[in-house]
Image (tube, rainbow, N blue to C red):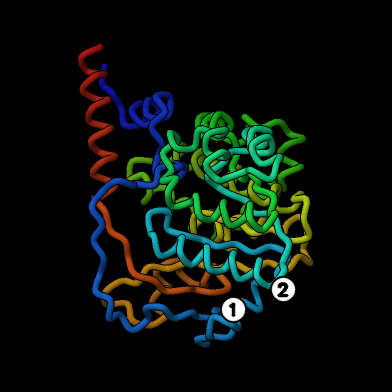
Amino acid sequence: MPVTIAKLIRALWIGGVCALILSGCSMGGHEQISEPTDHPLLGKIWDARTGNFIEYDLLKGQAAQARHLLLGETHINPEHHRIQAEVIGDLLDEGQSFALVMEIFETDQQQAIDLATSDDRATADKVADATGVRNSGWDWDSYRPLIQLGLEGNAPILAGNAPRKEVRQVAYAGLEAVPSDRITELGLSTPLPAASRQTLTQVIIDSHCGHALGDMADRLVDAQRVRDATMADVMLTAPSDKSVLITGAGHARRDYGVPRYILERTPDATVVSIGLTEVTTGLTSPEDYVQRVAGEDIPFDYLWFTERAMFEDPCEKFRESLKTLGDHGQKAD
């Protein structure tokens, strides 16, 4: 019996290997290669709403005024984590009180996090021990300083991501796997606009190296929506007047990501989404990145341009995983 791509991807999920777009896998541990540091956009901040470059002090003021602030990263880029730490530290220095919401933790780990942070001796490493995050695929060294900053500033540390088991169930069966009352609670009853869903579907297909098509892509889109809506829910119900989300840039997009679900439920909320954006050789104006990341409209309030962190091709690793499972499947047949 032939082993289909769909069966192989399904086997990857069952075996605990993360599909790229839904994963906590940070692609860490590979040799880093950076693009040239003379790119004209490097270090600049673009205000997508006004179409102007701005200084960091102005962005910091906007971040301070937001009820919900999203710092969208490329997980494997150290500069993105440095910038996140800078923003968090500056907010704390200005006396801001906020909850720090982390994509790297899943909501069913919140009790363990609360226990680990329940006294004055709490450290980021205690949180790691309590959650097992070091063995989850995330590069813990990238996130430790952010959580330590939050703890030192008395910020509640909140798990933002949907539990992996729930995400897998949706990836297999679509939103039918989620109870109807939970669908309503998360704001998933309203479908994404056609253009937003089409954009997200293409992102899913590209992130799975062209192997997730048709019904499978639709289910993975639903799984992504559950993750985005869950992070929005955590931000909305945080025990602080302000929430700051540390997440992948895709989740921080206003067209189909976390901000959409925040605004679906609280239309008057002030949301600021910062997309930490890696520069690309040959793309030298912000308008180039408007087309590259969104097709028609930029999906962030601000783009902060940084060096690119390049590692081995993740699609090659994905293909190797599929081939290994395929070989095993053929032997089993």
Q: Position of residue 287 (x, y in %)?
A: 43, 80
- Secondary element under disc 1, as helix, strand or loop, is helix
Q: Residue at x 22, y 18 (%)?
A: 330
For badge 2, the amino acid type reads: Gln
Q: Is residue 174 at least partly visible in the picture?
A: yes
Q: Is residue 274 above or below residue 41?
A: above
Q: CA distance from mark 1 to mark 2?
A: 10 Å
**Residue 62 falls in image quadrant:** bottom right
Q: Is residue 152 above or below residue 93?
A: above
Q: Residue at x 74, y 53 (%)?
A: 236
Q: Which residue is mark 2?
A: 65
Q: Is residue 229 at least partly visible in the picture?
A: no
Q: Do the residues bearing badges 1 and 2 touch, measured as CB atoms within 8 Å? A: no
Q: Nearer the viewer, residue 67 or 283?
A: 67
Q: Residue at x 63, y 55 (%)?
A: 152
Quarter in which the C terminus is drawn: top left
Left or right: residue 203 versus residue 319 is right
Mark 2 crowd level (few <14, some 14–19, many ≥20, 10 Å Cα): some
What is the residue that sits farthest to the top in this orientation? Answer: 333
Which comes sooner in the sequence, label 1 or label 2?
A: 1
Quarter in which the N terminus is drawn: top left
Q: Which residue is mark 1?
A: 59
Q: Nearer the viewer, residue 214 or 88?
A: 88
**Residue 13 falls in image quadrant:** top left
Q: How many numbered discs sit on the rendered protein? A: 2
Q: Is residue 120 above or below residue 196?
A: above
Q: Position of residue 293 (x, y in %)?
A: 43, 66
